[in-house]
Image: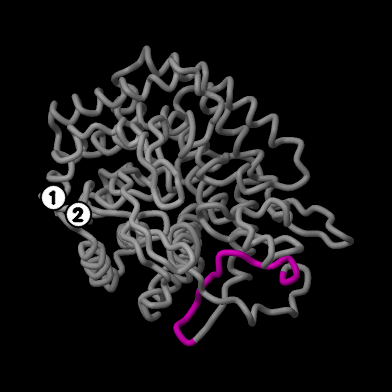
Amino acid sequence: MNDLILNFAEKICCFDFDKLENSTNYNNNIPWEKYTLSLGYPSLVLFYSQLNKLFPSSKWRNISHKYIEKSLNYINEGITTDISMFSGFTGLCYSIWVASNEGKNYNVLLGELDKHFFKILDIKLKSVLPKKNFNTIDYDPILGLSGILRYTLLRKENPKFLEYTIKIINILNTSINYVELNGFFVPKFYIRPEDHFTEEDKISFPNGSFNIGMAHGVSSILAVLSLAKINGIEVSNTNETIVSLSNWILKNRMYDEYGTYWPGIIRIEDEINSDNIFKSYQIKRQAWCYGTPGTSMALLLASKALSDSNISTISINSFLNIFSRPESEWVCTSPTFCHGYAGILQIAKRFYQESNEIKLLKYIKSLENSILTFYSIENQFLFNNIEYNLQKAHIVKDVGLINGAIGVILSLIDIEHQEMCFWDQPFLLS
């Protein structure tokens, strides 16, 4: 796989990404947001920084620096109001931090970035604090506090970052509070009907719902609070929150002939009426974003934070059950990270790293082979993203981290190098 990774690095380093701003994909979206970690220059900074960690070379450091300079136009153009990890300022800061070799370089630049980071983080925190219930964009890793917290954890040796780390943890700890809803009490992470992302969900869940997934759901809160504890941050009530969220997720696991699984979303009716026991949920996806892979990973991290062998066993067995299920039921049609094979592959590698479960090795090999079926030297970035709309497949040429080629390529890093991998931190896998 090393040759493929290095070939990709050579192929894209001279590509004129700015010209992507003049292109659109099937739904008229531009496949390039130059200042975001999701699909912009920060994703390239992250990629070449990870490459330099694995294969140290001044060449990779210089390329990373080139993309840092391009990323800094984010500040010069004044587009600095979005604090999120994947779409905003945190992603930019994160990419430069990992390029800095944990602060050994770019000290002056990081100091300037930090000033603005705290300024817009204060705005975010003030908007979330008074809310009766959380919207997913308040707490998720894509746009919310989970992604921001993953970055502040990396900077915890800095007193101000530690202060804000604790502030965010305290806010996320309130997720287990219950709020009144039409005479019933439900967890604070209840999603109101109008806050659903899609019209389909608004129709399917007219009274509201609970999102279990890693991308936009409660699994992300569990994962990042567990990572905080694993990284030595002890905050009052965090243990209670990790236990409560774990129990809530475990309460909502479902079973069929292939074993345990989780749907992406739970109806409000099923939370209120425990007798209304989940007979009509179908598996819509097996991926990092929704379904068993991401949720079982969150539970694995919780088991490590709590030193709970029972949760660990459940999480490992639940993840293994995925491979007993016919692949046609995975709804996995793309090689990419968010809702494709790359996300499942990287989760499998992290499960193996934590558990040494030997069965995972053959599944890892199988997932790698599945990804390679999408490879073509003719593809602009070697791997295309494939999106479905109205049951029709659409090819999307995306170089980025979350739905693009960078996420695919990084997932192919050999399993023995996982100790040196930091690129999956924004996804809350490490």
Tell me the amino acid under the disc marked 1: Asn
Vertical placement of residue 81 versus 402, above or below = above
Q: Quadrant of the N terminus?
A: bottom left
Start and end of the magenta stretch?
257-270
- Closer to the chain start, of discs 2 and 1, is 1
Where 183 falls versus 83 (above or below)? below
> Which residue is located at x 57 percent, y 72 percent?
253
Residue 247: percent from the left, percent from the top? 62, 64
Q: Per the image, is 266 magenta?
A: yes
| Amino acid marked by disc 2 | Asp
Q: Work out whether residue 159 can be spotted.
A: no
Residue neighbourhood size for the residue with mark 1, other residues' Cα within 10 Å, grouped as few (<14), some (14–19), many (≥20) = few
Q: Secondary structure at mark 2?
A: loop
Task: Based on the picture, tell me whether residue 427 belongs to the magenta stretch.
Answer: no
**Which residue appears at 51% of the width and 45% of the height?**
141
Find out whether the residues at labels 2 and 1 contact each other: C-beta distance under 8 Å: yes
Q: Which structural element holds mark 1?
A: helix
